[in-house]
Amino acid sequence: YIALTFDDGPHKTVTDRVLNTLKEYDAKATFFMLGNQVDYYPSLVQRVAKEGHEIGNHGYSHKYHSKLDFGANTSEIQKTEDKIKAITGKKTSLFAPPYGDFNEITLRSAKSLGYKTIMWSKDTIDWRRDGVDKIINRVLNNPENGDLVLMHPTQDTVKALHVIIDKLTELGYEITTVSKAIE
Ligand code: ZN
């Protein structure tokens, strides 16, 4: 199993295209959503859920969680959970801290709300916008069972997605959700 994760969405234009591609391959993914984006695009949240993907929590406003006290950690996570739950009817239970930044307080806060804190094993660094090939290579360089691949909603990421899924499938991997990949 390899899990593709899409952070920072839902995104106005890219999320739909990502979903179309995943559908084409009957692949599943995990979308770590930002609460303030959920506010803007509730219908995209609905589509992600309806098509069987996993929704995770990425906090509300993309803060450095190691710089927040327990209460602020908790409110960032809880606020986003509430917004997503209002749309999908489901509680989120995976938390991906923005920038991969967290400390003991973050972990304690997430755990108290029923979350597992998730980090990636492969970073596409797609936000750097240095081209489709680089994104592809970063994923396909030595893929391993259980890899969690960090991606963002960029145009290049969508372009890279076909090649990535084709190749990983060819290597015998199932493209799936984080929950399934870490089982
Ligand atoms: Zn992020």
Image (tube, rainbow, N blue to C red):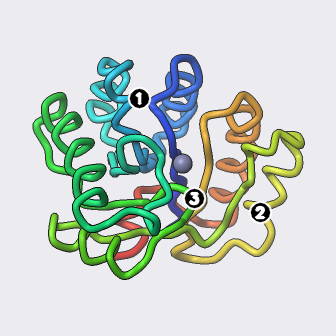
**x 61%, y 66%: residue:** 172
The answer to which of marks 1 and 2 sits earlier in the sequence is 1
Q: Dividing the picture into quarters, in which one does residue 13 lie? A: top right
Q: Dividing the picture into quarters, in which one does residue 100 lie? A: bottom right
Residue highlighted by disc 3: 99
The image position of residue 37, as x and y in percent, is 41, 29
Nearest to viewer (mark 2 / mark 3): 3
Residue highlighted by disc 2: 140
Say if disc 3 is inside 8 Å of ligand 1.
yes
Closest to the observer: 128 or 49? 128
The answer to which of marks 2 and 3 sits earlier in the sequence is 3
Residue 37, labelled with which disc? Answer: 1
Residue 15 horizontal side relative to residue 89, left or right: right
User: Spatial distance from mark 1 to mark 3, Cα to Cα?
Assistant: 17 Å
Of the residues shown, which amino acid type is indicated by label 3? Tyr
**x 33%, y 33%: residue:** 51
Relative to residue 116, is residue 23 depicted above or below? above
The image position of residue 178, as x and y in percent, is 41, 62
Circle 1: is it few (<14), some (14-19), or many (20+) Cα within 10 Å? some
Relative to residue 102, is residue 50 depicted above or below? above
Nearest to viewer (mark 1 / mark 2): 1
Closest to the observer: 80 or 165? 80
Say if disc 2 is inside 8 Å of ligand 1.
no
* Local secondary structure at mark 3: helix
Closest to the observer: 85 or 179? 85
The image position of residue 43, as x and y in percent, is 31, 18
**x 51%, y 18%: residue:** 12
The image position of residue 66, as x and y in percent, is 45, 69
Residue 107 horizontal side relative to residue 143, left or right: left
